[in-house]
Image: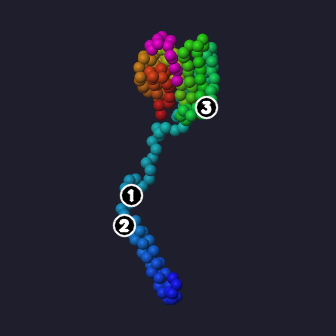
Amino acid sequence: MAGMTPSRLTIAVMVAVSLVVGVVTGVVAAKIGEPPPKGPALPLAVAAGFPTAGRAYLPGVTVSLITQDWLGKAAWTCDVPEPAGYLNAAQQRTLCVAPALSPMSVTVLHDGSKVRSVSASCRHPLGSTICTTLYSAAAELVFTTIPEHRASAAGWAAGNATLDANTTIGGIRLITDLSARHIRFVAAE
């Protein structure tokens, strides 16, 4: 800007400011001219049945009900192994194994005493009485506080021990999985 007189410098600054103001005004005018976004002005209300954290647990099922009242009395050994990254939302995992090196186990995913899921695994031959008995006994236990569904849940668990299947009974999802050779119980909501 050497050789510019003060009046030319003033004119150059005014031109630059005018260009910037013009560009900003054009952008604002373009945004104002766009049609308003479509859709509801407010988010839709959440339905009363929408899942909440409190509904993530199996109703009335506690860790002690499974590990002490059921498996402990049958001489199973329960332990709390180190937490693993696959626990979903559960904070803890308790693993119970059958006595005499029997290839059966029960895994409980839980937050304190509240149980998120129960899985009963059986590596005996598919359809064996011991596996169907384990699955139906687990179902009866999980449905302790829902007595009107206990028999149907136990029957479904035993009847689907040789299938990949799932159903929901009384707000609890029952899932049999042949590749993992287990039945899993989780809150359906």
Q: Secondary structure at mark 2?
A: helix
Locate residue 118: give its quadrant: top right
- Where 41 sits versus 153, above or below? below
Q: Nearer the viewer, residue 165 or 147?
A: 165
Is residue 116 something that shows in the picture? yes
Tag 2: residue type?
A: Gly
Element class at badge 1: loop
Which residue: 43% across, 48% down? 44
**Residue at figure coordinates x 52%, y 84% from the top left:** 2
**Secondary structure state at the residue bearing disc 3:** loop
Residue 153 visible (yes or no): no
Q: Position of residue 172 (x, y in %)?
A: 48, 27
3D distance between C-alphas at marks 3 and 2: 56 Å
Which residue type does callout 1 highlight? Pro
| Distance CA(mark 1)–CA(mark 3) | 46 Å
Q: Which residues are magenta?
A: 119-130
**Which label is found at residue 47?**
none
Tag 1: Cα neighbours inside 10 Å, few (<14), some, or many (≥20)?
few
Q: Which residue is mark 2?
A: 33
Q: Residue 187, image x and y in percent?
A: 50, 30
Location of mark 3 (residue): 83
Mark 3 or 2 closer to N-term? 2
The residue to which callout 1 is attached is 37
Q: Is residue 125 magenta?
A: yes
Is 16 in the magenta? no
The answer to which image quadrant residue 126 occupies is top left
The residues bearing labels 1 and 2 have C-alpha atoms spaced at a distance of: 12 Å
Residue toward you, 99 or 135: 99
Residue at horizontal 45 percent and vertical 42 percent from the top: 47
**Residue type for callout 3:** Pro
In the displayed structure image, the side of residue 18 where residue 87 appears, left or right: right
